[in-house]
Image: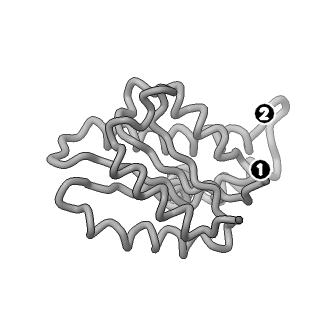
Amino acid sequence: MSRTWKDIVRDAFNDVTSRYDQIGRKTGGRTLSLVISPKAETLAVREWQSYIPSVQARFAFQEINILDITVEETEKIGLDEVVNLLENPMIGEDPKKALGLRWENAAIKKMITICKEEHEKKLIIYVTKLSALYPATTPKNILQKLWKNIDQITVPVVLFLPGTEKE
C-alpha cells in the first residue's frame, strides 16, 4: 500500500515529537528527510504546521525556508552581478557552483546560529523549499554539510526533500 504525503508528514511529526531524544542516536545524525512531491510541498508544510499547536507546550519549531535564503544571498551580491557572472564566467570559474556553495553555507550557518540560541523548549528545525537550490546545487549537499557540522547542529532537523518515493 502506497503512503500519501499526509501519511508521511503525520508519521514524521509523531516520530520527531515522541522520540525526540532518540533521533540520531544510532546514526549520529539528527536528520529526518521527508520525500515530498514538489507539487505537494506547500500542502505538506501546512499540514506539518497544523500539528504544531498540539505540542507547543513542550516543543519549539523553527522553519528555515531555503527560497528565502537564496533570495537574501543573491540580493547581497546583487541580481545584476549574479546574472552577469553566470552569463560571462571568468576562465576557470564556475559561478553556478560558487553561488550554490554560498547558499549551502548560509543555510547551515542559520541552523548553527539557531542551535546556539537559548530555548526553553525542545527545538525542532524544519527545512522547506529545498527545490530553490536547483540548478546551482542540490539538497544532497545540504545533507552532507549537516553531517559535517553534526557537533554544532544539536537538534532534530526535518527536511522536506523534493522528489518522489521509489518502491
Residue 6's place in the image compared with 119, above or below, is: below
| Marks 2 and 1, how far apart at CA | 10 Å
Identified at 32% across, 56% down, the residue is: 61
153 sits left or right of 101 in the view: left
Q: Secondary structure at mark 1?
A: helix
Q: Quadrant of the N terminus?
A: bottom right
Residue to which mark 1 is pinned: 86
Percent x, y of residue 14: 40, 57
Residue to which mark 2 is pinned: 93
Identified at 48% across, 50% down, the residue is: 158
Q: Amino acid at mark 1?
A: Leu
**Foreground pick, 140 / 19:** 19
Q: Secondary structure at mark 2?
A: loop
Identified at 55% across, 66% down, the residue is: 7
86 sits left or right of 35 in the view: right
14 sits left or right of 100 in the view: left
Q: Amino acid at mark 2?
A: Glu
